Image (spheres, grey):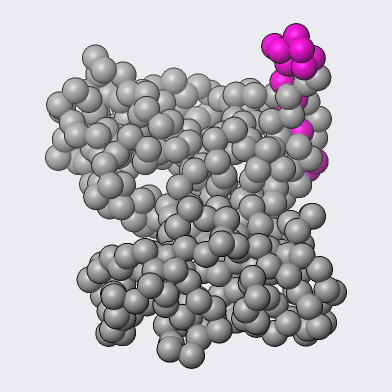
Amino acid sequence: MKVVLKNLTKRFPSRDKKHPEDVIAVNDFDFTIPDGKLIGLLGPSGCGKSTTLNLISGLEKPTSGQIFFGEDDVTKLPPENRGIGLVFQNYALYPHLTVRQNILFPLQNLKGDAKMSKQQMETAALNVAKLVQIDGLMQRKPSELSGGQQQRVAIARALVKMPKVLLLDEPLSNLDARLRLQTREEIRRIQKETGITTIFVTHDQEEAMSICDLIVVMKDGVVNQIGAPQEVYDSPENLFVAKFLGTPPINVFEGRVKNGRVYIGEEDVLSAEGLTDGDVYVTVRPEGFKAESDGVLSLDLERIEVMGRDVSVIAHHTKSLNADIRAIISSDISLDTGLSKVRFNLNPKKVFIFDKTTEKRLK
């Protein structure tokens, strides 16, 4: 099911007497979510991603704009008539019901032509339980399940009606690191097998980048960039996107462009042919550093952290805006830890330059 958001805006009245103007949670969101794709709404807390999800689900009403499922305008439809499946961060299972009863619950409330026989409901519940691999837990109650198992029950309950759109609101936040990794892979598998258009809200950029077909990066209710995860990572449109995506985070330096060259401090580090002279932000991905004795950029060495196949060089520079500069290099490269400085050349594909005033990328 294709989902179209047209100039979607949501304002909340201010509760601050000193600042009576409305709070804009979502500001003129305009986007088409392709049929059968997994889309990630990504951004820090307060960016408007959960509000956007609530608008799509019908839990919130937009201040202005429209929402279409396919060709149908669902802007004013209540949630129960939209054909959605919704999975919350805290599972929201009925504690007094078994897994089987939790999954059956949405089917038991169907009316009219959608109403199912008891046998049809049992078959549908079992099929979806097998899909999320909990068919052996049907007689247990939520308190007898692990966090990951409870989340699978919540997903099964959302899927059992075969919704037009599946909405996931921070579904992995309550899981430990290993279980989070396993569950996100399961979400991707389930989405692929069912082909249901899925919208996944998260503040974790690693989650979004690993399983989504497209990511929507948001800040203060405004969409900053939309694209395939790797495309957004490799070509951020502004400084916020560059800083938000990537682990470890991108390294940001104060620099300047002069006569077609980029300078960090007094060091000429890169060509900037075609760019206007002036102050800029120079950003370098951690993997964009190449440790070489004749490197163009010198950093003050703090320490070296060995991480198996990679080595993380922790350093400082007077023009760095990061507390620590992190450069990731291969463990095959040997660095003299007794040195006070280490030199690097930069991979131009991993360096992005941004206007100092607008923070937009200069290309």
Place of residue 344 in the rendered image (x, y in percent of width and height, measured from the top left): 48, 81
Please provide percent x and percent y for residue 91.
35, 29
Task: Check residue 132 for magenta coloring.
Answer: no
Q: Is residue 11 magenta?
A: yes
Residue that lies at the very extreme toward the bottom in this rendered image = 294
Q: Quadrant of residue 248?
A: bottom left
Relative to 295, say whether 358 is above or below: above
Closer-to-camera residue (171/359): 359
Q: Is residue 207 left or right of residue 356?
A: left
Q: Residue at x 79, y 14 (%)?
A: 20
On screen, 171 above or below 341?
above
Q: Position of residue 194 (x, y in %)?
A: 43, 53
Determine the residue positioned at 24% across, 28% down. 99
Vertical comparison of 114 with 352: above or below: above
User: Can residue 310 be seen?
Assistant: no
Q: Which residues are magenta?
A: 4-20
Q: Nearer the viewer, residue 333 or 151?
A: 333
Relative height, residue 118 to residue 285 (above, below) = above
